[in-house]
Amino acid sequence: MAGRLDGKTAVITGGGNGIGRACAERFSAEGANILIADLLTDPGNAAAEAINSSGGSARFVEFDASSQEANEAMAAAAVEHFGGIDVVVTAAGISDGDYRSGDIESQLKRMAKAGEAAANNPAAPLIELDIDNWRRVLDVNLTGTLLSIRAAATVMLDQGRPGSIVTIASIAARDPLWGSPSYPVSKAGVWMLTKNAARTLAPLGIRVNSIGPGFIETNMTEAMVSVDEYHQRVLDNTPMGRRGTPAEIANVALFLASDEASYVTGELIHPDGGWFTG
């Protein structure tokens, strides 16, 4: 029985871990060739090797989401190795300008510092916001998503066959959550960028949709849930009472990437454990 992405090529940015890796593995299981693009070479190579060892076909390219040149090189690599691009998932992202996946100790220090500043001055997350930090978050999360969409769509249009682009937003696209505005603003931008791209590209055969996950079991949320106060706040606002798994997000991405979603474009789907039921 053929897989839902049999013979197609999927590019996964941020594919070295978390949601990106789960998408890479799920899409491979459904027959896709996988190009993993990630800033971190060790996780990226490990993800590609795991797919190849399980009988799939994957390549890794080092990738800076905020770089136009890196996005164009990513698209060129997909063409070189697999002959084109059919699906893209833009999972590369950061929670703040100093974020590095897996560095939980540094995240905890930044959280403690931000919490102390907010306790002394509730307006601190806004009026004391470091503008370089703000720019870095938007460069990676928002401009990086634009660059990936543009690079992939160029290839899709050149090859003359339909394609599907899945961006990764967040519940923060609709809920400012707590603290710095950088992350929620970047993800709200991804939501609107998705809608704009969907309207532009739909007549040309390219669908563009977005996923807005709730709190998922990834490196990005690990520091937060290690602090009882924040963890409880997450659970209290999630009716299912738990974080989601990367595989649960990958399943949604698979639907949007596949022909099963052939009449779906411009949507933001929230696999969030019920966050927006209130």
Image (tube, grey):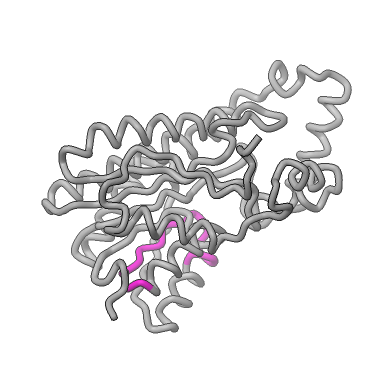
Q: Residue at x 44, y 34 (%)?
A: 191
Q: Is residue 134 left or right of residue 165?
A: right
- Give the total of numbered labels: 0
27 over 56 or under it: above or below: above
The one nearer the camera, 164 or 114, is 164
Q: Residue at x 69, y 19 (%)?
A: 126
The one nearer the camera, 52 or 162, is 162
Q: Position of residue 170 (x, y in %)?
A: 55, 41
Rendered image quadrant of residue 11: bottom left
Rendered image quadrant of residue 255: bottom left
Q: Residue at x 60, y 23 (%)?
A: 131
Q: Position of residue 219 (x, y in %)?
A: 65, 56
15 over 59 or under it: above or below: above
Q: Position of residue 276 (x, y in %)?
A: 61, 38
Residue 217 lies in the magenta stretch:
no
Q: Position of residue 198 (x, y in %)?
A: 29, 37
Q: Which residues are magenta?
A: 30-44
The C terminus lies in quadrant: top right
The one nearer the camera, 140 or 278, is 278
Residue 38 lies in the magenta stretch:
yes
205 over 101 or under it: above or below: above
145 over 105 or under it: above or below: above
Q: Residue at x 56, y 31 (%)?
A: 174
Q: Residue furthest front?
A: 278
The N terminus lies in quadrant: bottom left
Q: Is residue 72 left or right of residue 61?
A: left
